[in-house]
Image (cartoon, rainbow, N blue to C red):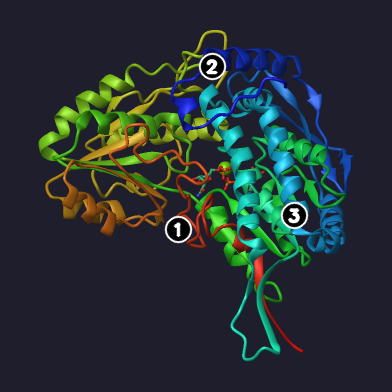
């Protein structure tokens, strides 16, 4: 694409009309490409399987976007062998060359911004600005990790020396074959981000994307290929998590893994990956059950806007989505009125159409979960908005209304379950300490939000909330929204295994191990 747009926070806040036009042209083009058969990419070659699976759009199940390969254990073995064979040369190459290649791939992603975003909207039901953001964030993660290697001289530092005859250094070195397993909800950033970090650090990579989002991962594969990634250094394999994912993890030649997805699968990986002959690193980024506390000293307009955007953006399917709100009893009624007014303005429908801020939920099991959760919430609480699936004329898709639930008893299990749907539950509180105890009383600790105009209250909240990503008084997203270099993004407790966040100072080092080198003259 010749016309290049730099998408940032500010472009997304007030998009240029040309941005809309280019996106709309790309949607037409993406639809013209429906129905192709897409390969895997193993040892520098396209590979097809005997068995394929269809990828249909959740916007309209009649849209068969393409077919993808059901990878087999043989494909896994071949990909690991290729990555292992490519590791010595790739890891010993001057780091400047790896940095240059990753930057080139980032530029190729930016060049294909509209094409990738349009396909991503169709693939997973993201609205246009969310999809454009995800694609450009992917490219910026590539750049961020390349910059991190460069700024730190590839983490090669002198140590103290006993005498002039001693030359002591600390160096970081890559591990080897690194597996990246990614989720459906940020199919660009959460596949490309970890893959680029692993690669620029000198590892070779096998990417296994979510079965719902193989197409975005194929675009990333093409950008790396076109940037000139050497044979075997990057491999892309599709198929089920249980077969392809699990056999990658069970392979003895895999040195490390980055998993982003649910708590259940992440904990399973953490437990089973440790049964090998020696410890191997696992970066597991898992779910959230993200709370917002609204003090009686809050600006309620900001609070309502922030909660609405975080609860319902991407149909509530962000790991950072706000799913619990604790609001001071004195201001609850006023807050609810504002939240309902904003929520009633949301259009749900084909998210490639500008007017529709919400698209469909991701897949059939999410659609069924929604109906199951809503039935439970209706029985035990008060559904004050939404709570129903929606028919959109002309579409056969998984549309569900944004849903606000009041009066759900605090001991109801759904206060602790990550529903991962456009559902938010609201409860009043009498004092802030009580709200803090509730907010922290879950297995998760990913993001959290607070609304108050009182500085002492804000400091108290920052000091006590147990989560990795905090936002105070943020109308553009009470618990959501992060960009490399602007917000570090990583979870505490059951939301993340390392305590080090993506898009920040300590991330890329996790793909390397330290070696101390003492040389005596
Ligand atoms: P998921 O169901 O846990 O799947 C994630 C990935 O794991 C998919 O590629 C899946 O493949 C694969 N997988 C499943 N079982 C596996 C196994 N036994 N061995 C190896 N791989 C396996 O998650 P999701 O539904 O795609 O994504 C939603 C979840 O991700 C939510 O919980 C959300 O909070 C979390 N998330 C967390 C973050 C974060 O940064 N902390 C960011 C985004 C999302 P298949 O698709 O083929 O099953
Ligand atoms: Mg899933």
Nearer-N-terminus badge (2/3): 3
| Mark closer to the observer (3, 1) | 3
Report whether the residue tagged 1 is closer than 8 Å to ligand 1: no
Q: Quadrant of the N terminus?
A: top right
The residue shown at (13%, 50%) is: 431
What element does badge 1 sit on? loop
* Residues marked 2 and 1 touching at CB (< 8 Å): no
User: Could you tell me residue 172's position as x and y percent?
Assistant: 67, 69
Quadrant position of residue 324: top left
In the picture, the disc for residue 96 is: 3
How far apart in space, not on screen, are marks 2 and 3 (Cα)? 44 Å
The residue shown at (23%, 44%) is: 409
User: Could you tell me residue 364's position as x and y percent?
Assistant: 57, 31
How far apart in space, not on screen, are marks 3 and 1 (Cα)? 37 Å
| Count of numbered circles on the image | 3
User: Could you tell me residue 68's position as x and y percent?
Assistant: 77, 34
In the picture, the disc for residue 494 is: 1
Quadrant position of residue 123: top right
| Residue 243 makes an appearance in the image | no
The residue shown at (65%, 27%) is: 113
Residue bearing the label numbered 2: 350
Using a 10 Å C-alpha cutoff, classify the residue at mark 1 as few (fewer than 14 neighbours), some (14 to 19) or many (20 or more): many
Residue 99 vs 215, above or below: the answer is below
| Residue 290 makes an appearance in the image | yes
Residue 348 vs 297, above or below: the answer is above
Using a 10 Å C-alpha cutoff, classify the residue at mark 2 as few (fewer than 14 neighbours), some (14 to 19) or many (20 or more): many
Nearer-N-terminus badge (3/1): 3
| Mark closer to the observer (2, 3) | 3
């Amino acid at each position: 694409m010749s016309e290049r747009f730099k998408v940032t926070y500010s472009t997304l806040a007030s998009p240029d009309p040309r941005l809309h036009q280019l996106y709309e042209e790309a949607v037409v083009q993406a639809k013209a490409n429906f129905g192709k058969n897409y390969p895997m990419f193993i040892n520098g070659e396209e590979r097809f399987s005997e068995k394929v699976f269809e990828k249909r759009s959740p916007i309209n199940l009649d849209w068969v976007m393409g077919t993808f390969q059901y990878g087999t254990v043989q494909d896994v073995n071949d990909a690991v062998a290729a990555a292992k064979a490519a590791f010595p040369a790739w890891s010993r190459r001057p780091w400047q060359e790896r940095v240059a290649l990753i930057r080139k791939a980032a530029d190729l992603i930016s060049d294909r911004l509209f094409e990738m975003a349009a396909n991503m909207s169709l693939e997973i039901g993201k609205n246009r600005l969310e999809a454009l953001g995800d694609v450009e964030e992917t490219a910026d993660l590539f750049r961020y990790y390349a910059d991190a290697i460069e700024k730190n001289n590839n983490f090669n530092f002198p140590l103290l020396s006993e005498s002039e005859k001693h030359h002591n250094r600390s160096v970081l070195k890559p591990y080897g074959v690194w597996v990246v397993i990614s989720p459906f909800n940020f199919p660009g950033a959460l596949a490309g981000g970890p893959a680029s970090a692993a690669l620029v650090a000198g590892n070779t990579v096998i990417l296994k994307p979510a079965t719902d989002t193989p197409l975005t991962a194929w675009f990333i594969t093409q950008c790396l290929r076109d940037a000139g990634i050497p044979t075997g250094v990057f491999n892309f394999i599709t198929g089920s998590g249980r077969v392809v994912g699990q056999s990658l993890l069970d392979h003895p030649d895999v040195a490390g893994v980055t998993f982003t997805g649910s708590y259940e699968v992440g904990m399973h990986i953490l437990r089973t990956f440790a049964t090998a002959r020696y410890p191997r690193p696992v970066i597991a980024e898992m779910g959230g059950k993200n709370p917002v506390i609204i003090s009686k000293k809050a600006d309620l307009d900001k609070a309502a806007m922030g909660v609405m955007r975080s609860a319902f953006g991407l149909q509530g399917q962000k790991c950072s989505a706000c799913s619990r709100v604790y609001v001071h009893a004195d201001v609850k009624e006023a807050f609810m009125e504002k939240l309902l007014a904003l929520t009633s303005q949301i259009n749900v429908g084909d998210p490639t159409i500008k007017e529709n801020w919400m698209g469909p939920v991701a897949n059939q099991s999410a659609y069924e979960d929604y109906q199951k959760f809503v039935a439970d919430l209706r029985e035990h609480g008060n559904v004050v908005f939404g709570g129903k699936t929606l028919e959109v004329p002309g579409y056969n898709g998984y549309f569900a209304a944004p849903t606000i639930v009041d009066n759900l008893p605090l001991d109801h299990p759904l206060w602790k379950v990550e529903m991962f749907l456009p559902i938010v539950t609201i409860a009043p509180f009498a004092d802030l300490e009580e709200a803090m105890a509730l907010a922290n009383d879950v297995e998760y600790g990913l993001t959290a939000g607070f609304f108050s105009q009182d500085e002492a209250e804000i400091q108290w909240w920052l000091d006590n909330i147990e989560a990795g990503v905090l936002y105070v008084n943020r109308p553009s997203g009470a618990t959501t929204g992060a960009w490399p270099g602007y917000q570090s993004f990583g979870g505490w407790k059951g939301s993340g295994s390392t305590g080090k966040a993506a898009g920040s100072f300590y991330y890329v080092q996790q793909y390397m191990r330290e070696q101390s080198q003492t040389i005596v003259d």
